[in-house]
Amino acid sequence: MKTKQLLRKAGLGLLGLIFSASVWAHGGAAGTDTDQCKFELQPSHWVHYTAYQPSAFPAEEFCGKLPGLNTLTQLVFDYQDLKYRNMLVEFEVTKEPEGTRVFFLPSAKHKSGSVNLELKNGVAEAGQYLIHITLVPDPNDTENRSQGERLDVHMGFKAGGGQAVSKNSLLLYAFFAFAGLYVLYLSNEGFKTKVDEIFKKVKD
């Protein structure tokens, strides 16, 4: 009985660690890297940017440094001002300093205010990259045309860097490993007996 209680307490503690790491990664505390990931379109008007590499780093968010190469990379942009949602937005990613285009999304309206750029194979080479965002008024939108002017903004990021596994990923993998062992302990009498014997020896 004490063994089960110990395992349950350990499981709850691990869950708490994972939750805390997840909150930190998703902007739960001031001053996180992702809070600083933003483009200034105009004074006091911003586009917030977050990068993900879900295949390689499922529990991480990134900003200026993307550790993985040749892996699915998602660049998510959010602009809250309604007037920008009526503008045409064009996205481009280039390898620097050559200026070689690696991704391009033609101009279009994004009424939801959120855009997800999906680079299916990520970027192939380590080094510096530049995200270009161009917003232009829609010539067919006579109602809002007077609000808009052409805006060009840029933000750089570095790809590669040899980061093997993120902290949050390690915690996530540890959680699933522990959960699997706990289920095995509850469902397999032979495994349960061995674990109980080990805990008994440790206690003694």
Image (cartoon, grey):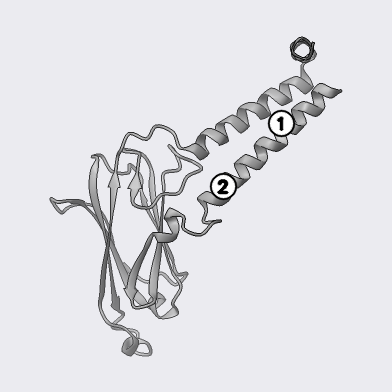
Where is 110 relative to 82, above or below? Answer: above
- Whole-angstrom CA distance, mark 2 to mark 1, is 18 Å
Which element is circle 2 on?
helix
Where is 143 relative to 159, above or below? Answer: below
Question: Which labelled disc corresponds to residue 173?
Answer: none
Where is 91 relative to 46, above or below? Answer: above
- Residue 165 spot, x, y in % from top left: 44, 33
Residue at 35 percent across and 40 percent down: it is 67
Residue bearing mark 2: 22
Residue 141: quarter of image: bottom left
Estimate how packed mark 2 is, as few (under 14), some (14 to 19) or many (20 or more) residues with alpha carbons within 10 Å.
Answer: some
Image side of residue 23 versus residue 120, left or right: right
- Choose between 57 and 147: the one closer to the eye: 57
Which element is circle 1 on?
helix
Image side of residue 47 versus residue 4, left or right: left
Residue at 34 percent across and 77 percent down: it is 87
Residue at 34 percent across and 47 percent down: it is 65
Q: Name which residue type carries label 2.
A: Ser
Identify the mark nearer the N-term, 2 or 1. 1
Question: Which labelled disc corresponds to residue 10?
Answer: 1
Query: Can residue 106 be seen in the rendering of this structure?
Result: no
